Amino acid sequence: MKTIKDINTGTTPQPLTDEKLEIAGGLWQDTFKRLKKNKIAVFGAIIIGILFFCAIFAPFLAPHDPENGLLKDRQQPPSEKYLLGTDSQGRDVLSRIIHGAGISVQIGVISVGIALLIGTTLGVLSGYYGRWIDVGIMRLVDIMLAFPTILLALAIVTVLGPSLKNAMIAVGIVNIPRFARIVRASVLSVKETEYVEASKAIGCTDMQIIFRHVLPNCLAPIIVQATLTIGTAILEAAGLSFLGLGAQPPMPEWGAMLADSRGYLRQAPWSVMYPGLAIMLTVLGFNLLGDGLRDALDPRLKE
Amino acid sequence: MSESILEVKNLIKYFPITKGILSKPVGAVKAIDDISFTINKGETLGLVGESGCGKSTTGRCILRLLEPTSGQILFNGQDIAKLDSSEMRLLRKDIQIIFQDPYASLNPRLTIGDMIAEPMRNFGIGTRKTQEKRVQELLEIVGLSSYHTSRYPHEFSGGQRQRIGIARALSVNPKLIVCDEPVSALDVSIQAQVINLLKDLQKEFSLTLLFIAHDLSVVKHISNRVAVMYLGRIVELADYKNLYKEPMHPYSQALFSAIPIPNPGLKKNRILLEGDVPSPINPPSGCNFHTRCPQALDICRHEKPVLKEHKTKHLVSCHNLDSEQRRCKGTDKTSLPINY
Ligand SMILES: Nc1ncnc2c1ncn2[C@@H]1O[C@H](COP(=O)(O)OP(=O)(O)OP(=O)(O)O)[C@@H](O)[C@H]1O
Ligand code: SF4
Ligand SMILES: [Mg+2]
């Protein structure tokens, strides 16, 4: 057995001689590297990239006016002039889809923003303070989870009144439990770490501990959840719009487009199919990227 | 010299074991079971014992990172077990801790500079400028370089991280530092460097340390006095020299016999303890060492021995030493029905 009997007693600090410096990338660098290797996640990221590109440059990309069409050109099949055809009011489906991208991005970001903000707050309170605060908040969350999300969203919009803004609020509210749960779980585990104990020992207040030491270390699962939830939020909002409770005509929201054209499925299938495809691809993109992020952030899956 | 800075009196810490949704208490882990000791200004008290005997729990109770179940912790005469959380926060400036695991005790999201400056910011010491200067000073003091301030913990090795932890603890000029096995997670060669550093710092800034270790040889180089712990109790407390020369408690004797001696000419009988450390949930009655003690007496099974001064400044808690009479009886081991 080796012991440290050969300690000398010089008064100058020992230089760092035989210590190896292990350089590893930070969490985000490593994650990005692993994510790049995941082809499926990259595919998701490309879809989302296209979505954002359309959202930002819609006015330049769309060949026609999304809200006013020529009645003489109604229900045109896809052609050179109208790449994806026109709907029952003669509006270009492609232009409407491109403009709809911006609305979908807005829905995703705002409703997930609402869910994230409130859900994270509840999760932190619950996980950090525990006891009756935890019991109270978690029971509330359980009650919310007992309802199917779309039903709950429907109920909220019915109370608030149908509009895109209210649809976003409703979708935001129904997604609060997901964030509350995930944040609570990671706060619980981060709270037990030695660096959080150390932060208490160096005189941090609860607020400083939460914002400097706990939350930054819970970021990974929150980001994964946010990515996945944007997809479902867009889908839920489209559902509400389809039922006439979200975006109102003539707004080119994809769910509303489906609702507008569903009566003409036989005469103009393209006016139903393409908005549906846009919704599907967007949700798929966010799901693939979210799954990829989760795998990339979890070092246990590292080969 | 022997002015005490910390006095721990009858400290007890039980972790309740609860069951079911109603958190009904069904028992307790007796992590610390009535310990008392003092630390004098400028000295280093070593605290040794096997894994799980309650060393870290003792350290954490002193910092109130854990709430003691009962007992007094007098810091400069003030009972810190009674302070409310905001008073305690202010007092943390005077008591700091260096943790066991340098990989777990640094927040991976903060730069080294921020980390070392954080205690000063929390207690409002100095301006941003002077804090920055102090951070660089501290980095040099612990043997790192001032250009390390903008780096993150993952860029450092274990020994370097422990130095960062030391710099952080020193930043507010604490009066007492609890070192919770600061080197046990490090390579042997680096252990020596870090212990030397602590020793030098102690001399230079006349620090008072509570130095926790599970290994007597680590404690040897730094401690003035040593307390030996077994299963939540202190069994022996003495100057290191006296303890080394003449360990009096059977448990300490076993610990010391396990240290390899540098001089091969000298022969020592190695005392091997049999059996495992009993669970702190249901510790043995009487002297909790009796299940493994080679010298156990009848009385040991139902009466707790008291920590008493048996030689000058040499405290031991053992029935065997309590009276000469019993000692004679105790050597007649064949009459003992105790399995050891
Ligand atoms: N939070 C806790 N809840 C329940 N039991 C605990 C808790 N912390 C520690 N214990 C128990 O208290 C006992 C003492 O633990 P402690 O960490 O103080 O040991 P230690 O002497 O520091 O050991 P090591 O050398 O392994 O660090 C152990 O039996 C441990 O299982
Ligand atoms: S009191 Fe008895 S059992 Fe305990 S150490 Fe002394 S002799 Fe052994
Ligand atoms: Mg420990």
Image (spheres, coloured by chain):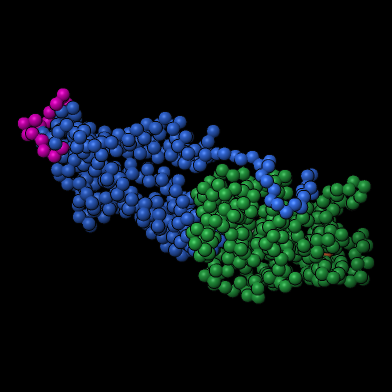
* Location of residue B333 in the rendering, given as x and y in whole percent from the top left corner: 91, 60
- Chain coloured blue: A
Q: Looking at this view, is A164 or A135 the one in front?
A: A164
A38 lies above or below B100? above
Splitting the image into 4 quarters, where does residue B62 fall? bottom right
Splitting the image into 4 quarters, where does residue A89 fall? top left
Q: Tell how many labels.
A: 0
Q: Main secondary structure of the magenta part?
A: loop
* Location of residue A237 in the rendering, given as x and y in whole percent from the top left corner: 26, 46
* Location of residue A198 in the rendering, given as x and y in whole percent from the top left corner: 57, 58
- Chain coloured green: B
B102 lies above or below A26? below
Q: Looking at this view, is A226 or A36 the one in front?
A: A36
* Location of residue A84 in the rendering, given as x and y in whole percent from the top left corner: 19, 29
Q: Residue at x 56, y 57 (%)?
A: B134
Observer able to see residue B223: yes
Observer able to see residue B66: no
Q: Residue at x 75, y 71 (%)?
A: B2
Image quarter of the N terminus of chain A: top right
A25 lies above or below B241? above
User: Which stretch did the figure color magenta?
Assistant: A66-81
